[in-house]
Amino acid sequence: MNNIRAHILWVDDEIDHLKPHIMYLEDKGYKMTTVTNGHDAVELVTKFRYDIILMDQFMPGMDGLETLRRIKEIRDTVPIILITKSEEEWLMDEAISEKVDAFLVKPVKPTQIFIAAKKILESTKILEEKATSGYLKEFQEIEFKLQEQLSINDWWELYNKLVKWQLEFDEHKDTGLGNILEEQLQTSNREFIHFINSNYTDWLASENRPRMTVDLIPDKVIPHLKQGEKVCFILVDSMRHDHLISVLPELQKHFNVEIDFATSILPSATPFSRNAIFSGLFPDDILKKYPQQRKDMENHAASLNQHEKDMLKDQLKRHGLSDKSLHYHKIWHVDEGKRFASRMAEFMKVDLLSIVINFVDILAHKRSESDVLKEMLPDESGYRSAVKTWFDNSWFSEVIKQLSQSNYKIILTSDHGSIRVNRGVMVGADKDTSSGIRYKYGRNLNCKERSALVIKNPKDYRLPEFGTQTNYLIAKDDIYFVYPTQQHKYEAMYKGSFQHGGISLEELFVPVVTMSSRK
């Protein structure tokens, strides 16, 4: 009895004719209880718990559907397989509406029942075992790959594999491999930091560099506009690749989807990477062309992305597209998003519709200030879940549906990602230093090189200088910066939070999705 697979209740007025089926299931390890009518089935369910119920539809007295309803009032979660002689569609519709777990048409073979029961009762266990064996095999392959000289495309492929397993383990948390995957991601990030340190400045000096965020609009938007197509460019601030993959099935319902990537410039932060996207320029040239942007950064203005629309207009002009109509819209709040969705028909008359959405970034920042959000977003999995919930239920979902009925080519992307930080490192800085958690710029910044990329010559990184002795600190690993004063306060505030500006796979790899309507 200890080897019982599950306890099945079979309800059928002709149960005596089903003894070969019952014996087959018993041989497979199931404990079988049988009754011939719905009333007896309901009475048994009030007294005992069954793992699954096989239900005949056509029985004297209460039929199968009525019995099912009565049973669900008592044991709402018990799986039920409806077995019937009828193939009429109305019955199938009723069964679906009553949330029947499987529908079989008589005559049924014992193997059919066994397969249906196994799928319902054991699919989670089977999928977890498959995930475990699959990851353990790929774990070794990734470890070997990390010993090779990888290109940026190799790193993208490797990161894709890690993200795939992150989402797999979100579904199957009982594999016990989540911590191993997290450690492998940390190992990969350490190797990726070496890769960036060795290659980044060479990319900046080469015309054959990988696509960086500064190249996004020239590579992904301009060609479509030049071909006379209308483009909707959607930038979701701080959206990571794993966030995108979590909502991909919903996007694929409405669009043909192609996924590509770009690499964020350093620092992987909104004032740098997003301004580079809209201007098509590196930060040093941005400040030369836009003096007001320099003033904003010198004065540490509340927003360092106030000139994106002008930057985008100028970029179109440089590409000979000043005749193209443009609507730029930045959305910070839910009410603004709803208003935007309600006016979509008006906005979709332009050649280039550009939308900036700040929800994902706000969610990460607000987590540090809210105990409720800390409970809801305790880790990477919680962050992914929150982003997917927002996507599925927000005004943005309505915008996506409306765009799917349009003739727009849609480019969905981000400016950078974020990483969960855990180790506070003290830095020395003067009072005019920037306030970033994963990056800082100012004068006389001090930090150990094992914790940060220390940039003493900003020109090498196409970064602006603010007076003499300007230098930058870019955090490595899961580091965040704290000052010696009030160190413990800020460590408590930021430990476990999601931050950006540093060097990691999560921050630097920017997903780029090109979508066209299925209509």
Image: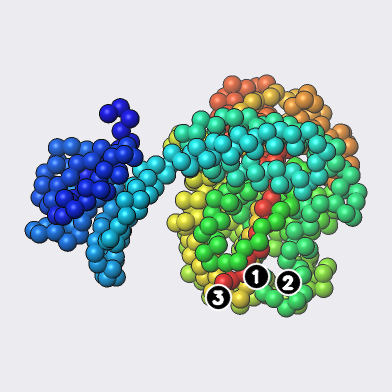
User: Which amino acid type is marked by label 2?
Assistant: His
Q: Is there a contact, CB below 8 Å, between mark 1 and mark 3? A: no
Q: Is residue 370 above or below residue 207?
A: above
365 relative to 8 in the view: left or right: right
Examine the rendered structure and indicate whether residue 315 appears above or below residue 424: below
Give the residue type that dot 3 points to: Lys
Q: Which residue is mark 3?
A: 519
Q: Secondary structure at mark 1?
A: strand
In primary-sequence order, the first of circles 1 and 2 is: 2
At which x and y percent is residue 7?
26, 38
Residue 476 visible in image: no
How crowded pointer 3 is (Cα within 10 Å; few <14, some 14-19, many 20+) is rated as few
Q: Is residue 516 above or below residue 251?
A: below
Q: Which residue is mark 1?
A: 409
Q: Give the numbered dot on residue 224.
A: 2
Q: Pick whichever of labels 1 and 3 is earlier in the sequence.
A: 1
**2 or 3: tag closer to the N-terminus:** 2
